[in-house]
Structure formats: C-alpha cells, structure tokens
Image (cartoon, rainbow, N blue to C red):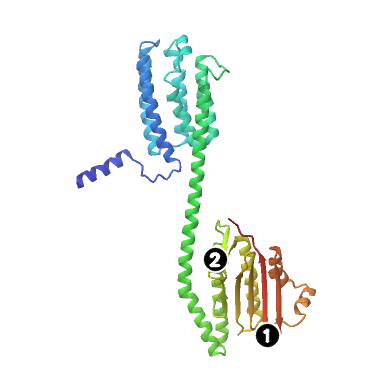
Amino acid sequence: MSDRVASSGVARRIWHVPDVADSDPVGPLWRAAQLFRLLSYIYALGFRLGTNGDLHHDGVAWVLFGVLTAWTLACGIAYYVGFGRNRYWVAAEVIVACAMMLSTSYVATTWWAMNNQTWPTTLWATNAVISVAILAGPVGGIVAGVLVGGTSAFVKSTFDLNFGRNATIIVIVATGMAVGLAATIARRAHAALTAAAAIAAAAQERERLSREVHDGVLQVLALIARRGREIGGRTAELAELAGEQERALRRLVSDAGTGVGADTTTTDLGPMLHAFADDRVSVSAPATPVVVDTTVADEIRAAVRNCLDNVDHHAGTTARAFVLLEDLDDRVVVSVRDDGVGIAAGRLAQAREEGRMGVAKSIVGRVESLGGTATVDSEPGVGTEWELTIPVRRETS
C-alpha cells in the first residue's frame, strides 16, 4: 500500500498535476479548454483520415499533422499545468494555428480549399482563440477570432458578406468574446471573494486582539486608575494618566472592532457605544441590534466621543458619564449625561461669540449634518446632558 502511495506521489511530481485548489482564478477554464482541445484534435484526425488521398501533397500533410499532434500535446500540458499560461505561449499558438491554416494553399488545390474547410479544420484552430480569450479577456478573444477567421477567408481567397452561408468567422469571434467574458467574470469574482476573505480574517484577528487587550491591558489600566484615585495624592496623577490611556485604547479597539475601514454598509450601534465603557463611563443599549448606515454610525461615534472628551476635560476628575441608546423606530436617541460641575449659564453662547466653535462643530454640526438635533441641558453643580436625536430609515419588507 505504501509503495502505491509513493509511486502516486512520484507520478504527480513527474507530470506536475495541479492541485485541486488552483491559485489561478481562471484555472478551471484553462483545464476545461484542454478537453475541447482533445475533442478538436480527434475531429482533426478524423478529417485528415477522411481527406487522405484528396490533397495535392498528402505526404507533407501527414508531416504537418505530426507537428500538429506534438503541438497539441505540448499546449495541453502547458495550459493544464499552468506554465504556459502567458502571452508568449499563447502568441506562439496563434502563429502555429494560422500557419497550419495557411499551409492549405500548399497541401491542397485551390478548388479543394474553396469547397472545404481550411486544413487542419477550423475547429482545431479555434483553440488559439480560446487561449487568447482566457488570457486577455473578451477584447483579446475578438481580435484573435478576427485574425483566425480572416486567415481562413484569405486561404479561400474570398470574403462572403452573406454570413448566413459563411458564418465561420462569426462563430469564431463569438466564441472568443464569450470565453473572454467568462474569464473576466471569473477573475472579478475571485478578486471579490479574496477581498471578502481578507476582510473576514482581519475582523477575526481584530476581535481576538480586542479580547486579549480587554482581558489584559484594559483591566490593568482600569485597576491602576481606580486604586490611584483611592490612594490620592501624587498617585492620583498616575491614576488620571492610566485612565486616559485606558480610554484611548478602548477607542482604538472600538474602531477596529466595529469594522472601520472595512467594506461594510451597516453598523450595530450597541457594540459600538459599549466600547466606550470604562470605570467612569457606563453604557446602556437595547438587547436587540440597533443597525444603521455605517456613515451615520461613524458620525454618531464621533459626536459621542466628543461629548465624553468634554466630560474628561471639563466635568471634573471624579465625574462619571452615562451613555444611553434608545431605538425609536424612525429615529435613534443617544443621551450622554455626566454628574460633573456642569456648564455655567451663557458659557456656550460666549464661546461661540469668541470664535471657539468646538462644541458647535464637533457635536451639533455632526448631528445636524445627519438631519438630526443635538440639545444640551446643564446647570452648575448638577452636571450636563447631551441628547442626540438622529432620524434613520429602515427597510420595510
């Protein structure tokens, strides 16, 4: 049994039989084309036997048919295995096919050429058109079809515009176009699948890294921040630095985990907002997915991030923030509330008059660009609450 397995492996190495998972996106087309090549060769052999004795130079025709046999075998192996799938080999095949067709003028009489298909059959010559189409697409297939079909017309010394009686060139050109389109579609589908697989793999890796970061670094930073505040003194400064790093890292993980940069069209707001949660930020969201357009989700994320940044910078070192997500069918509402020092009356209006438009642009401007509204309610010593209302369009069945 082991000897048979070993001999099979040797055979695969000798003949270079391609693995089932051909890396060439049009590999199946190349292999299928070689079956057509075999059938067309059998047809050419039958045609040669059938016309034996009818040609002007039968001996030369048999020598040329020997060359054709060797070339057919070489092309079949080269294209099936893969080392011949290049422009040089394909160009050589077109030259050989046209040369074989042109030899009709020598091996046969003019009368024979006029009343029969070009030697060694148009069907066999179509292999060259198929190879060009697979390699170069529909345009290349059409050009090769015109060249091969034109060679046939040249040999016959006639070009009949009545394609109802002489449809050979139309069939050859149509074959090149159809096979070229199939090859182009196969390459595009392969590229799309490869991109989707890469995105899926990247997403899985991000999720794995996010879990590891959450279970390790984030928890340690949160512990340092909490214990540092409890100890107080100069340790509180280290606690604030640890807290800032924890929040920055959570936001980085949030961007990766929610597929920023990925080719997605919708995003679930729940997991996106939960990524902001830490020892000072609590997040509440519905148990069911709240799915919106990714562009809308990105703007909501940025607005909420700015609200939380304001809590960090202005609400006080001990302030906590509370984020609430509500799904109201035709709109979503995100509330960001803190228990900090609040905003003095008229402070926002004064900031606008002084040309400081941070809040207006980063929060209000983002939400209004989505057709929503952003309102703020704050009193000194009570805290601040932002309410972001964004209309959403849901698909109805």
> Element at badge 2?
loop
Mark 1 or 2: in front is 2
In this rendering, position of residue 330 left or right of residue 254 = right
Query: Which residue is at a point 46% across and 29% down the rendered structure image?
Result: 128
Residue 262: quadrant of the picture: bottom right
> On the image, which quarter does residue 83 sit in?
top left
- Going from N to C along the chain, the mark reached first, 1 or 2, is 2
Q: Is residue 349 left or right of residue 144?
A: right
* Amino acid type, residue under disc 1 in the picture: Val
Give the amino acid type for the residue marked by disc 2 in the picture.
Answer: Pro
Residue 82 location (% of width, % of height):
40, 39
Q: Nearer the viewer, residue 277 or 195?
A: 277
Q: Is residue 105 above or below residue 13?
A: above
Residue ID for mark 1: 382
Residue 295 in the image, given as x and y percentages of width and height = 62, 60
Can you say whether 255 is above or below 23 in the image? below
Q: Residue furthest right?
A: 353
What SS does tag 1 mark?
Answer: loop
> Which residue is located at x 48 percent, y 42 percent?
186
Disc 1/disc 2 C-alpha distance (Å)? 32 Å
Q: Residue furthest front?
A: 397
Q: Horizontal and vertical percent for residue 125?
A: 45, 25
Residue that carries the numbered disc 2 in the rendered image? 289
